[in-house]
Amino acid sequence: MIRCLVPDLPTADELLPWLQRIDANRWYTNGGPLVREFEQRLGGLVGGGLSCVTLSSGMSALELGLAALGIGEGRRVLLPALTFPATALAVARCGAEPVLCDVADDTWTLTPSIAREALAHGRVDAVMPVACFGCPLPADAWDGFVRDTGVPVLADAAAALGLQQVGRRVHWAFSLHATKPVGVGEGGLFVSADEALAEAVRRLSNFSFEHFVVQSRHGTNAKMSEYAAAVGLAQLARWPRLLQRRREVFEDYRARLAALPQVGMQPLAVPPATFSVRLPADAAAAAAALAEAQIETRRWYLPPLNRHPAFGGLRCIGPAGGDRLPVTEALATTLLGLPFHSRLTAEDIATVVDALAAALRASTSA
């Protein structure tokens, strides 16, 4: 079977020098030297003048970022219905109310213009756009949104580390999960130009201790261990060639899919984290056909949040203030995640695209 997603993490040999450093340091957690070095090198990846705080997960970066911004009970956070559930769960765990909105028809992301329209139809205390499937968000435009509205923005760029330009007014949360482009197994990263806010997130990740006195009920244990940092440091050494390989796979796909103009893609200048396409018909039938051809597919972010029992009662702000989310509803039936990882061969990609073409022909003739 052609697998849909295969993590590409450092080998044991690549990890060994870092593990030996842990042995020599006898420091395993609580902000050890490898964590500090990893954060410093991540600063070089996301851009200068930014504070980086490593955490135990991408969801921790979202949750603690919201808490540090003072988003809690009685506050409303606008976020797209097309996202991984962690986005809304982080809001709920802070005691705030997730408010769902639609996404743009081309990028499948919540845009500043959609957020501005939502502000006209209800109170919003913070906005959490999502880099859908790793599609980078327009950092400058979101910085402008914060400047013009005064509404804080915490971007869920979970799948976009190494791909996303980071702005100065927006705060950013990334995931280091094994399936992400820069994966360490499990981990997260909070990034901000606001050094005081970043330090608040760091403090919250260590039980909110200040001189061993708890300062906030949002304090938790969300620190990154030295072992995770060791994987991260080894992974950063591999990143240039990992990114190059992902570019090669993506360009091969893009060239072959040009023969299927009815298949839609996000407008991407960089390879995505996961590769979903928009089909002209029900994606479930195509998924079944590819499964018969021994090709594994996924339907990431689906069903959308408003169809999950836990989120069914959430308020939705759609176009013109209505409660329908037409783009999300259309994407819910037509998105299909194709195999995308560094171990795919040209033959694999050709097999996937040929099988997809056959499935589309079959759906047209049915």
Image: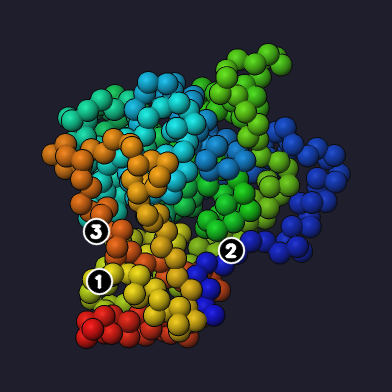
Q: Earlier in the sequence, mark 3 or mark 2?
A: 2
Q: Residue at x 57, y 17 (%)?
A: 216
Q: Secondary structure at mark 1?
A: loop
- Give the colour scheme shown: rainbow
Residue named by callout 1: 281
Amino acid found under the numbered disc labelled 2: Pro
Q: Nearer the viewer, residue 143 or 175?
A: 175
Q: Secondary structure at mark 2?
A: loop
From the viewer's perspective, is residue 38 above or below residue 286? above
Q: Nearer the viewer, mark 3 or mark 2?
A: 3
Q: Can you say which quadrant of the picture contains the C terminus?
A: bottom left
Q: Earlier in the sequence, mark 3 or mark 1?
A: 1
- Which label is found at residue 330? 3
Q: Residues within 10 Å of mark 3 (few under 14, many from 20)?
A: some
Q: Nearer the viewer, mark 2 or mark 1?
A: 1
Q: Quadrant of residue 54?
A: top right
- What percent of the width, then of the height, locates residue 331? 28, 59
Q: Nearer the viewer, residue 72 or 237?
A: 72
User: Is 366 displayed left or right of 61 in the figure?
Assistant: left
Q: Residue at x 60, y 64 (%)?
A: 8
Q: Residue at x 37, y 21 (%)?
A: 74
Q: Residue at x 66, y 19 (%)?
A: 209
Residue named by callout 2: 7
- What percent of the width, then of the height, locates residue 281? 25, 71
Inter-mark Cα distance, 3 to 1: 10 Å
From the viewer's perspective, is residue 261 above or below residue 79? below
Q: Secondary structure at mark 3?
A: helix
Q: Residues within 10 Å of mark 2 (few under 14, many from 20)?
A: some
Amino acid found under the numbered disc labelled 3: Ala
Q: Nearer the viewer, residue 206 or 229?
A: 206
- What percent of the width, then of the height, locates residue 252? 40, 77
Residue 192 visible in the shown view: no
